[in-house]
Image: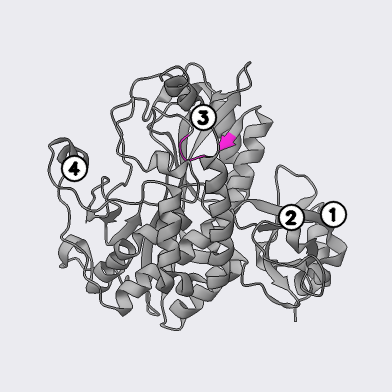
């Protein structure tokens, strides 16, 4: 039995008066409300209440016992927010009608993880967030925040880091106060683009931590008058942002299941099978890992202004090969498909489900790729199969892959497909500036 009085007293002694009860909608966007810390037991055992139909993707009705969405506080997630004095952040699980909500992506990930735990295995995920810092210009259009950030090849640019040192230090300090074990901060391949790396964690904790990272980064950027952007490809001529997952499995004894120093690419048989599952279901996974119209501007084989692109366009895998969809490194698997617009819970759940399918069916991956696929494409050689070219193709692939949908969670996938098809339809009806420029006077 949890000692709520003790927890409440401890929080109040640290100046906490409210709890930010945070969950995420189908799109992976953080939602929540502030509630008084004095009623922590109610928030943990019953949940903070929200109108279900007001949240994207719940599938809940407008009336009745299951019209209310309840976010139940996970007590081990409580921590003060440095950027909201007096407020403690809490991760919530979604419930409706006093039962776990099957359209809640966090509940969905927990369900997929149960099948892994029944095998005595643990999934570890290291997440690599890439992002842009933007501001609005005088014309109201979004542009790179640092006007002096204009190098032809901006990777690892120290001058940009010097100019933005105050923001980056604020980011470092705030994340550290929240318990992040930071590993590096660097300027990425595009002007205005950065990456912050922090320590890996078990799959559920990694997803929770990424949501907290985004919330923190938004707050810090706003404090400096800027926008932290998770848009995959905000600059047409520059590389886009990925959200690579570094994946490893351990058994009950802590043994690394994917690693085999004597195996091809440093992987065990199970590691190759997991990779094969990812490649086999890659088209359907694209919908959940790259879920926006803009995602497929990143997943294109075009050259960037910097001359460097790592876009994982082709379904292939190779040892330390960043031109492949699956990169193997140090006995781990790097899954390079996800981008930061994804619902991280759904993306990890789908990735794990696909990999386990590969292990259960003893799938064999294609021959490893030991060449630069962009150079291969330029030479006119036959290429490996490529990923879907747009969101509609990815949604069709997810719809057709009943094995993956059922393994991930049919209820969530049904809601996802419904909302994302509406998103594609809205985009398809939009007339862009490019179309007007090329067609208005052409005929």
Q: Which of marks 4 and 2 is nearer the N terminus?
A: 2
Membership of 232 in magenta stretch: yes
Toward which corner of the image does residue 224 lie, by quadrant?
top right
Q: Name the residue under label 2.
A: 32
Q: Does the magenta stretch include residue 319?
A: no
Query: Dot 1: within a 10 Å radius of its alpha carbon, few (fewer than 14), some, or many (20 or more) residues?
Result: some
The quadrant in which the N terminus is found is bottom right
Q: Give the range drawn in magenta.
A: 228-233
Please report the residue visible at 40 percent of the width from the left and 80 percent of the height from the top. 252
> Tags 3 and 1 in contact by the CB under 8 Å rule?
no
Measure the C-alpha gap from mark 4 to mark 1.
55 Å
Q: Residue 290, can we see it?
A: yes
From the image, tell me which residue sits under label 4. Answer: 372
Image position of 155 with respect to 322: above or below = above
Q: Please name the residue shown 79% across and 61% down the image.
A: 51
Seen from the viewer's position, the closer of residues 188 and 14 is 188
Q: How far apart are marks 4 and 2 (CA)?
A: 45 Å
Q: Looking at the image, is mark 2 or mark 3 earlier in the sequence?
A: 2
Query: Residues at badges 2 and 3 in contact (C-beta under 8 Å)?
Result: no
Q: Name the residue under label 1.
A: 17
Q: Around disc 2, counting alpha carbons within 10 Å, would you say few (fewer than 14), some (14 to 19), or many (20 or more)?
A: some
Mark nearest the camera among 4 and 1 is: 4
Which badge, 3 or 1, is on the more N-terminal residue? 1
């Amino acid at each position: 039995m949890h000692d709520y009085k003790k927890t409440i007293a401890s929080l109040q002694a640290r100046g906490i008066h409210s709890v930010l009860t945070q969950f995420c909608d189908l799109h992976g966007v953080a939602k929540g409300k502030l509630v008084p810390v004095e009623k922590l037991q109610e928030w943990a055992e019953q949940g903070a209440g929200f109108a279900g139909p007001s949240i994207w993707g719940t599938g809940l009705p407008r009336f009745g016992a299951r019209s209310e969405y309840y976010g139940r506080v996970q007590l081990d997630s409580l921590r003060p927010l440095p950027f909201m004095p007096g407020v403690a952040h809490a991760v919530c699980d979604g419930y409706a009608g006093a039962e776990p909500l099957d359209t809640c992506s966090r509940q969905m990930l927990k369900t997929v993880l149960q099948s892994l735990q029944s095998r005595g295995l643990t999934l570890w995920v290291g997440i690599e967030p890439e992002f842009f810092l933007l501001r609005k210009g005088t014309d109201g259009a979004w542009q790179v925040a640092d006007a002096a950030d204009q190098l032809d090849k901006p990777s690892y640019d120290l001058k940009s880091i010097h100019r933005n040192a105050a923001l980056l230090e604020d980011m470092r300090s705030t994340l550290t106060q929240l318990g992040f074990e930071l590993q590096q901060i660097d300027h990425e391949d595009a002007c205005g683009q950065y990456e912050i790396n922090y320590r890996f964690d078990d799959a559920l904790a990694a997803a929770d931590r990424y949501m907290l990272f985004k919330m923190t980064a938004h707050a810090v950027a706003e404090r400096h008058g800027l926008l932290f952007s998770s848009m995959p490809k905000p600059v047409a001529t520059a590389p886009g942002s990925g959200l690579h997952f570094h994946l490893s499995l351990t058994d009950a004894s802590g043994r690394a299941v994917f690693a085999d120093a004597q195996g091809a690419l440093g992987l065990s048989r199970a590691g190759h099978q997991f990779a094969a599952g990812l490649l086999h279901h890659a088209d359907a996974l694209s919908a959940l890992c790259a879920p926006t119209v803009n995602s497929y501007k990143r997943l294109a084989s075009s050259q960037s202004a910097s001359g460097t692109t790592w876009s994982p366009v082709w379904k292939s895998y190779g040892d330390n090969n960043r031109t492949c969809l699956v990169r193997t490194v140090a006995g781990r698997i790097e899954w390079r498909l996800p981008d930061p617009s994804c619902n991280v819970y759904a993306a990890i759940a789908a990735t794990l489900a696909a990999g386990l399918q590969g292990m259960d069916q003893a799938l064999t991956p294609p021959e490893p790729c030991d060449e630069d696929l962009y150079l291969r494409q330029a030479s006119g050689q036959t290429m490996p199969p490529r990923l879907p070219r747009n969101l509609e193709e990815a949604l069709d692939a997810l719809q057709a892959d009943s094995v993956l949908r059922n393994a991930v969670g049919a209820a969530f996938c049904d809601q996802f497909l419904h909302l994302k098809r509406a998103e594609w339809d809205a985009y398809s009806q939009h007339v862009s500036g490019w179309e007007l420029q090329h067609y208005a006077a052409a005929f």
